[in-house]
Image (tube, helix red, strand yellow):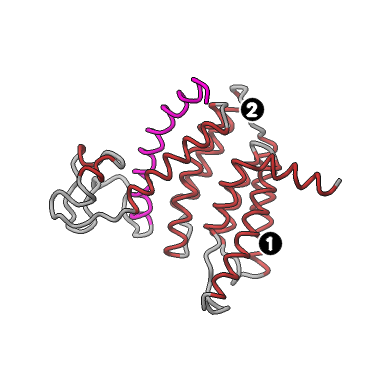
């Protein structure tokens, strides 16, 4: 890696770890209908507030050997793992998309996708409290970025929003038991953000999301799930979008080569 790449890593990693720490709160509190602002972070077992020194992403969990300082109960490893995953995602995006405007757009977006995937897998819901604000913030950011001359495509963002979201809306209306409105809203968000990079990103995200969803449904059936049992589609949409953010140009090129 170049010296500039190391600078990107040094900037992206701490922001990613901090954002991942915030996402652990979001994943825990939003499905429960709680505020993500108050009260401060607390032990999930005894409810004791976590001191600032004990709330440093990953480091505090390691130093405390994964236990609450107040009650000694084990703190689930999912907390530092979420922080590490988000930190790695931020670093990967910073290296894959050197343009700062794109990196700042995609890194938090990727973190939100991780949170939504976890929540949907646990609760079979994609909370509007997360999707709607992310849509609004992303749209405003893209408008500001375009005015500043950043390499973002507002037309592509609009087409992606309508195309991906509208496509799944048709599926949801035709087969309401097979597709939820939460999936439609998530697809619209993915289409908006990735469409700003180019429609090939949206196409690859949709293709991979549907492919992964189909594989996941087959695996669930083989594992003994009932045909009537709902399989959350959000994690597969999120996975397709995250993969597309990294490999869409290469996948699109391979596909076009196969056609020509």
Camera-side residue: 112 or 31?
112
Quick check: is 28 in the magenta stretch?
Answer: yes
Callout 1 environment at 10 Å: few (<14), some (14 to 19), or many (20+)? few
Callout 2 environment at 10 Å: few (<14), some (14 to 19), or many (20+)? some
Magenta: predominant secondary structure element? helix
Quadrant in the rendering for residue 177: bottom right
Residue 243's place in the image compared with 11, above or below, is below
Name the outermost residue toward the top.
3
Q: Is residue 176 left or right of residue 14?
A: right
* Distance between mark 2 and mark 1 Cα atoms: 31 Å
Please tell me which residue is depicted at 70% across the width and 42% down the height of the picture.
199
Residue stretch rendered in magenta on the structure:
1-30
Q: Which mark is residue 191?
A: none
Please tell me which residue is depicted at 47% across the width and 50% down the height of the picture.
114
Specify whether residue 229 is in view.
yes
For the C terminus, the quadrant is: top right
Please tell me which residue is depicted at 52% across the width and 78% down the height of the picture.
224
Whole-percent x and y of residue 95? 53, 31
Name the outermost residue toward the front.
1
Q: On the image, numbered disc 1 is attached to which residue?
A: 170
Whole-percent x and y of residue 15? 39, 33
Name the outermost residue toward the right.
260
Q: Is residue 62 left or right of residue 143?
A: left
Q: On the image, numbered disc 2 is attached to which residue?
A: 151
Camera-side residue: 137 or 6?
6
Quadrant in the rendering for residue 83: top left
Residue 66's place in the image compared with 198, above or below, is below
Whole-percent x and y of residue 42? 22, 50
């Amino acid at each position: 890696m170049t010296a500039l790449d190391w600078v990107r890593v040094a900037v992206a990693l701490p922001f990613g770890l901090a954002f991942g720490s915030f996402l652990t709160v979001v994943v825990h509190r939003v499905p429960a209908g709680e505020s993500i602002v108050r009260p401060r972070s607390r032990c999930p077992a005894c409810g004791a507030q976590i001191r600032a020194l004990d709330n440093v992403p990953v480091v505090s969990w390691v130093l405390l050997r994964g236990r609450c300082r107040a009650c000694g109960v084990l703190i689930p490893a999912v907390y530092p793992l979420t922080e590490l995953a988000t930190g790695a995602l931020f670093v990967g995006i910073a290296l894959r998309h050197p343009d700062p405007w794109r990196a700042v757009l995609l890194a938090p977006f990727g973190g939100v996708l991780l949170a939504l995937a976890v929540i949907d897998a646990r609760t079979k819901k994609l909370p509007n409290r997360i999707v709607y604000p992310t849509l609004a913030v992303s749209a405003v950011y893209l408008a500001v970025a375009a005015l500043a001359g950043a390499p973002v495509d507002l037309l592509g963002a609009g087409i992606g929003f309508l195309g991906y979201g509208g496509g799944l809306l048709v599926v949801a209306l035709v087969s309401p038991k097979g597709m939820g409105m939460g999936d439609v809203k998530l697809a619209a968000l993915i289409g908006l953000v990735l469409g700003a990079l180019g429609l090939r990103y949206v196409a690859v995200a949709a293709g991979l999301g549907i492919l992964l969803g189909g594989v996941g449904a087959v695996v669930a059936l083989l594992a003994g799930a009932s045909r009537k049992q709902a399989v959350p589609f959000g994690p597969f949409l999120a996975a397709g979008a995250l993969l597309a953010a990294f490999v869409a140009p290469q996948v699109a090129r391979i596909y076009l080569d196969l056609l020509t």
